[in-house]
Image (tube, rainbow, N blue to C red):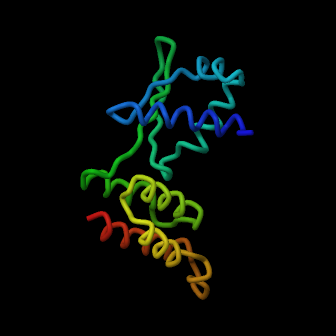
Amino acid sequence: MARISDTIENFIKDMIKQERERQVSIQRNELADKFSCAPSQINYVLTTRFTYEKGYIIESKRGGGGCIVIKKITYDDKDERVDLINTSIGESITYGNALSILNHLRDTNSITEKEYEIIKISLNDRTLVNVEDKNKLRSQILKGIITVVLS
């Protein structure tokens, strides 16, 4: 039996897949009513499953009942790729956050499964065993690889 968080996540992802612009507008309270859950459950799903590292941008629109816009990031143009490198990776990145980025790139077919595995191994803590600041080096490696692979 699927957890409510998984069900909500899949529902939103299905909505996004159906939209040409790869974005949807939802009203948190309406979605909570649909799934018979508290609005905070919707917030939880949005903040944990639809992060920038996982390839989404969330905007909150106020007024007129308010809504939340969820946009799937694509890497079709150079500016989006540069934004990924500068915004998402930064000067330091944990292995978990790096994996989130890699999973998104693999899921959007921006990298192959083989590239995914090679990059993942190169960023692993065991690979960076004698490094003082693993997260900083990991960031530099990931930026370099993504720059080459996505160019």
Task: Give the percent coordinates (x, y) of residue 83.
Answer: 34, 53
Identity of the residue furthest to the top in this view: 64
Quarter of the image for residue 19 reads top left
Q: What residue is drawn where x is 50% and y is 37%?
A: 13
Task: Give the percent coordinates (x, y) of residue 140.
Answer: 43, 73
Q: Quadrant of the N terminus?
A: top right
Identity of the residue furthest to the right in this view: 1
> Considering only vertical position in the picture, is 17 above or below 62?
below
> Considering only vertical position in the picture, is 77 above or below 24?
below
Task: Give the percent coordinates (x, y) of residue 21.
Answer: 33, 33
Q: How many numbered markers are drawn?
A: 0
Quarter of the image for residue 42 reads top right
> Considering only vertical position in the picture, is 127 above or below 89?
below
* Residue sitting nearer the eye, 48 or 10: 10
Q: Quadrant of the C terminus?
A: bottom left
Does 11 sit left or right of 23 as displayed?
right
Identity of the residue furthest to the front in this view: 1
Q: What residue is drawn where x is 40% and y is 65%?
A: 112
Task: Give the percent coordinates (x, y) of residue 114.
Answer: 43, 72
Does 57 sit left or right of 75 as displayed?
right
* Residue sitting nearer the eye, 119 or 47: 119
> Considering only vertical position in the picture, is 140 above or below 49?
below
